[in-house]
Amino acid sequence: MLRYVTTNPGKVREALQYLDDGVEQLDYDYTEVQASELGPIAAHGAREAYRHANEPVLVDDAGLFVDGFDGFPGPYSSYVEDTLGVEAVSRLVASELEDPRRASFDCVLAYCDGAGFEASPDPVDRDDRTAAAARGAEQGDEETEALPVKLFTGTVRGRIVAPRGEGGFGYDPIFEHEGTTFAEMDAEAKNAISHRGRALAKFGEWFAERTQ
Ligand code: ITT
Ligand code: NA
């Protein structure tokens, strides 16, 4: 049984569209190492979650990267949603940046099942200091560190707007793609173009071949 590792039920709803049979949520809060990119965070999380679950795991790490804020909040998106809230992010962006307030939503899926496969090269962090910190967080368990992890990424471009729509979760009301916010789309429409949908499609293809 594949475990989709997240504390966020909104992600699970979207993932189930791609991985309907044979996937179950694992509500496990893995350690989010400090890094300026999502790859190392997801890879570390997948190794830790696999050690915890002893079953194949898929970790989903996402973030909103605002161009004019040099990618902020990025890996800190969860913390910023909890502390400021998405309406405040929208107001902050509107007060500081000229229209169009462009941004990306990125998703990295990290798969680990303890077995060998042609793993993704270990994600290299732009910032050596945080990469060293990420490595440090993994030290003490060389076996876990050596587990192969496969990464699948998805990204979507859009704009930050004032909140609109009732659907989705998180930053969906303030992320507009071609005139429609993610919160104004149903899960299917969002999946068809979203960061997570794109990453899930890549994973689904690879996983189907692997489990044939
Ligand atoms: P897990 O780590 O347990 O999976 P999380 O919600 O903390 O749950 P992330 O760290 O990946 O997940 O998410 C970063 C933030 O981005 C968080 O505030 C989410 O609500 C938000 N987010 C993630 N995917 C999103 C999406 O598709 N649409 C809108 N917001 C999203
Ligand atoms: Na998180």
Image (tube, grey):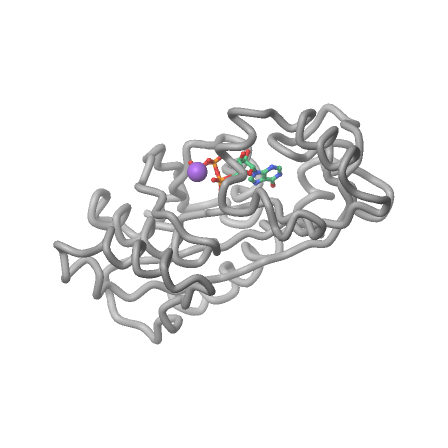
Q: Is residue 100 visible?
A: yes
Query: From what the image shows, is residue 46 above or below residue 8?
Result: below
Q: Quadrant of residue 32?
A: top left
How many numbered badges does the structure rendering display? 0
Extreme residue in the bottom direction: 118
Q: In which quarter of the image is the C terminus?
A: bottom left
Relative side of 65 to 102, left or right: left
Relative side of 82 to 174, left or right: left
- Residue plotted at (62% across, 49% down): 65
| Nearer to us in this view, 40 or 167 | 40
Relative side of 151 to 103, left or right: left
| Nearer to us in this view, 136 or 30 | 136
Residue 169 place in picture, x, y as percent: 61, 30
- Residue plotted at (40% across, 66% down): 123
Residue 91 place in picture, x, y as percent: 74, 28
Residue 142 place in picture, x, y as percent: 14, 61
- Residue plotted at (33% across, 49% down): 45
Residue 129 place in picture, x, y as percent: 36, 59
